[in-house]
């Protein structure tokens, strides 16, 4: 029964994370910055092609998700 309880907690946390991400995406147009178009993101537009790599956005999201996972893991102990 303990594994089912842990699975339930994990599903609740995943649901909350998805809800926060959904709210963030829904209201991202009203934020003072646009995620995915931050300074430092690499963008190249050629004559017939274009290339875009959001490196700063990836680093920012990685840091935020690492912090969230660290907090979740801290409270699970």
Image (cartoon, rainbow, N blue to C red):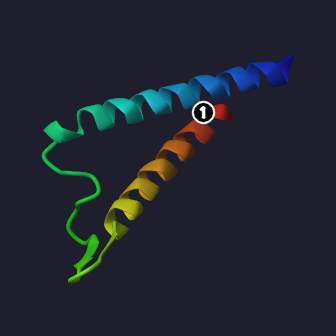
* Quadrant of residue 31 within the rendered picture: top left
The location of residue 25, given as percent across then percent down, is: 31, 37
Q: Is residue 33 above or below residue 16?
A: below
Task: Name the residue at 53% across, 40% down.
Answer: 71
Snapshot quadrant of residue 51: bottom left
Residue farthest to the bottom? 47
Left or right: where 23 falls relative to 46: right
Residue 18 in the image, given as x and y percentages of width and height: 47, 32
Q: Which residue is mark 1?
A: 75
Instruction: Determine which quarter of the picture holds residue 44.
Output: bottom left
The residue positioned 55% from the left and 46% from the top of the image is 70
Q: Residue at x 46, y 57 (%)?
A: 62
Near mark 1 (Cα within 10 A), the count class, few <14, some 14-19 or many ≥20, is few
SS label for mark 1:
helix
- Closer to the camera in the image, 70 or 20: 20
Judge by depth and name the residue closer to the eye, 74 or 28. Answer: 28
Q: Could you say where residue 72 lies in the image, as x and y percent from the top left?
A: 57, 37
Residue at point 34%, 60% (across, down): 57
Q: Nearer the viewer, residue 27 or 72?
A: 27
| 1 over 10 or under it: above or below | above
Residue 69 at what x, y percent from top left? 55, 44
Q: Is residue 53 above or below residue 32?
A: below
Assign the C terminus to one quadrant of the image: top right
């Amino acid at each position: 029964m303990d594994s089912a309880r842990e699975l339930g907690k994990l599903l609740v946390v995943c649901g909350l994370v998805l809800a926060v991400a959904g709210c963030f995406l829904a209201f991202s147009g009203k934020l003072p910055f646009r995620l995915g178009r931050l300074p430092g993101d690499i963008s190249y537009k050629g004559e017939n092609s274009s290339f875009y790599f959001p490196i700063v956005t990836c680093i920012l999201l990685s840091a935020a998700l690492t912090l969230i996972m660290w907090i979740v893991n801290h409270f699970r102990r």
